[in-house]
Amino acid sequence: MEFLADYAGFLLRTLTLVVAVIVVLVAFASLRGKGRGKSGGHLEVHKLNDFYKALRERLEQALLDKAQLKAQHKAEAKAAKQEKKAGKKRTRVFVLDFDGDIKASATDSLRHEVTALLSMATAEDEVVLRLESGGGMVHGYGLASSQLARIRQAGVPLTVCVDKVAASGGYMMACIGEKILAAPFAILGSIGVVAQLPNVHRLLKKHDIDFEVLTAGEYKRTLTVFGENTDKGREKFQEDLETTHELFKNFVGQYRPQLSIDEIATGEVWLGLAAQGKQLVDELKTSDEYLAERAREADLFQLHYAERKSLPERFGLAASVAVDRVLLSWWSRLQQQRFW
């Protein structure tokens, strides 16, 4: 009982302190935000050549003796000097990452990254997109695809690497690449359209609950969750799906004319090995392999536009950290009680 009383008192004091700190942080953030618009985010740029170089040097230090290391560094310095003397210009590779959810939320960062690189990239450079997405909303992935189309329209070579999955809206983005690389067991395809929703009209009717939908326009609503769906509404809904599917097929066919579009636009998916046979991809290769190869002859720059977190997001993060600290402190005190 004494332990429980001590713990309750400790927990109350800790929670009071946490709440007070959070209130102060929120008030401070609110004051800073008054009179200012959204500041947005910032562009982060990392040279991947340094990353690959650090990996190699760490391995060299473990495997080579001092004489071998000295000879290796001397040879590298000589090669760099000769390259500089010859005036050889290294090409640039801009590396982007897109990890897609159902809303294609990463498009917010992608649009800024594309705008930034197009301010400097030329036809001698290259953009590599590491893409992972199982698809999602049509309008979200439509906008994401339009961002990649900007790169093609600017005449900058675009290579898309798929290590895990690029299906449905993900493949809508991938097909824009002049070259598509995929891991042997990556998932590609799903060129189709799907929509589904429950309908509880009969349940409501059983319990004498009326649900009314008022519309202006014959097809303002076709299928609903609560109302009574009609055959005419179902036909219109299916017609809309077919129209969207046709647009999807035409879009893919525009960028991948070598495809037999009616054969592969069935909603099916294929693993990389089979996808290459269907010409959905051009080469079986992981992004790691491709970028490591390019790093030998080009300068690789990874771009990431980091969005500024909103006040609710920062508040949620601060609250989460505070709760974690309280639980950790409680667990520590509990262990002390056990041993004492």
Image: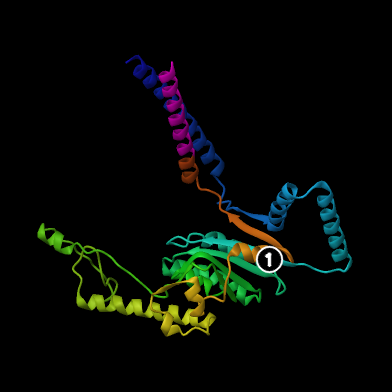
Q: Amino acid at mark 1?
A: Glu
Q: What kind of secondary structure does the magenta stretch mostly adopt?
A: helix
Residue 51 in the image, given as x and y percentages of width and height: 68, 54
Residue 55 visible within the image:
yes
At mark 1, the secondary structure is helix
Question: Is disc 1 surrounded by few (<14), some (14 to 19) or many (20+) residues within 10 Å?
Answer: few
Give the answer, above or below, for where 25 lies relative to 330.
below
Residue 144 in the image, given as x and y percentages of width and height: 51, 67
Give the answer, above or below, for where 19 lies relative to 219.
above
Check the picture and name the quadrant holding the N terminus.
Answer: top left
Give the answer, above or below, for where 154 lies relative to 201.
below
Left or right of 105 on screen, residue 93: right
Query: Magenta span covers which residues?
Result: 318-340
Colour scheme shown: rainbow
Give the answer, above or below, for where 123 lies relative to 296.
below
Q: Is residue 123 magenta?
A: no
Residue in view at x 52 percent, y 76 percent: 276
Residue 251 in the image, given as x and y percentages of width and height: 48, 79
Please identify the quarter of the rendering in which residue 299 is found.
bottom right
- The residue where tag 1 is placed is 293
Residue 331 in the image, given as x and y percentages of width and height: 43, 27
Check the picture and name the quadrant holding the C terminus.
Answer: top left
Residue in view at x 44 percent, y 66 percent: 135
